[in-house]
Amino acid sequence: MTFFRHKLALWIAAAGVLLLLPALAPAATIDKVVNVNVFVYCDNSGANCASTGPSGDLFFATEVNKIWAQAGIQVDFTLSGYRDSTNYMNIDDASAGHKFCEIYNSCVFNNLSSTVETLLLVHTIAGAYGEGWIGAGGMVIAMDTVMAYNSGAGRLDTIAHELGHNLGLVPGTSAEFDGSFHDIYANDLMASGGIRNTPTALNQISTDGLTGLDRLPADQVTTARASDLLQNAPEPGTWLLMSCGMGGILLLRRRNA
Ligand SMILES: [Zn+2]
């Protein structure tokens, strides 16, 4: 029994070291998380549903997470459901019955959530790749247009950009502000779609907010991190305790065996 306890102690120590290593890495600490509830729009019969993104990289989750890692934010996507609506699977904000704001019941009065994030995937949006509320949950992405971009490689940063609006970005009153919701620097994530240099590969995305594409300057990081859409990510110590708990369970099972 002494030998067995010794082995168990070693096992827990090894697990602890492995789990702590990512926290010690030099990259920005990921200490906040946003949970994104995804709804896919289909026609009235439930067919012809919008794309959920590239196979193996649904919702462009890899690119979205690399971009938002600059702010220490992890983005978790959950496919929450399908909505059968021929009217809203193609958004046109100039046409009653097809408007983005109607889905959120917010065209006339503010009925938006500051704590719940939702991502709507539709086929098209008249005149846009995406739309998002500023400082509240809710964005819609024109997946036909986004997926066809760059000869079918896809527009990698549209979801990340709209998420930025939801997290409160306009670029504020800083020197970056273009006077109309966006950033004047084409290499910044929050530059408007008309001027933004969008990445065509993962390695073009900035990791420091200074170089590369889809940069998030420090003042925008501060604004985004204050959003109520975010929750605190689990602390590394929590994972260590959980691993110890698992070790205990392992011990009990082996004793019973
Ligand atoms: Zn925008």
Image (cartoon, grey):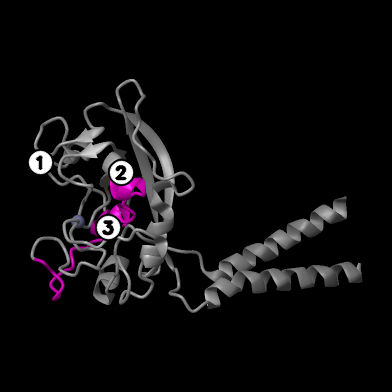
Check disc 2 and report its element: helix, strand or loop: helix
Q: Residue at x 39, y 44 (%)?
A: 53
Q: Is residue 125 at all visible to an observer of this figure? A: yes
Residue 220's x, y, as percent? Answer: 25, 70
Residue 30 falls in which quadrant of the image?
A: bottom left
Question: Which residue carries the number 1 mark?
Answer: 108
Identify the residue under disc 2.
148
Q: Earlier in the sequence, mark 3 or mark 2?
A: 2
* Residue 236 location, quadrant: bottom right
Q: Is residue 150 magenta?
A: yes
Q: Magenta stretch: give its range.
A: 149-178
CB atoms of marks 3 and 2 within 8 Å: no
- Please report whichever mark, 3 or 1, sits nearer to the chain's N-terminal start: 1
Indicate the amino acid at tag 2.
Ala
User: Can residue 68 be seen in this snapshot?
Assistant: no
Circle 3 residue: 161
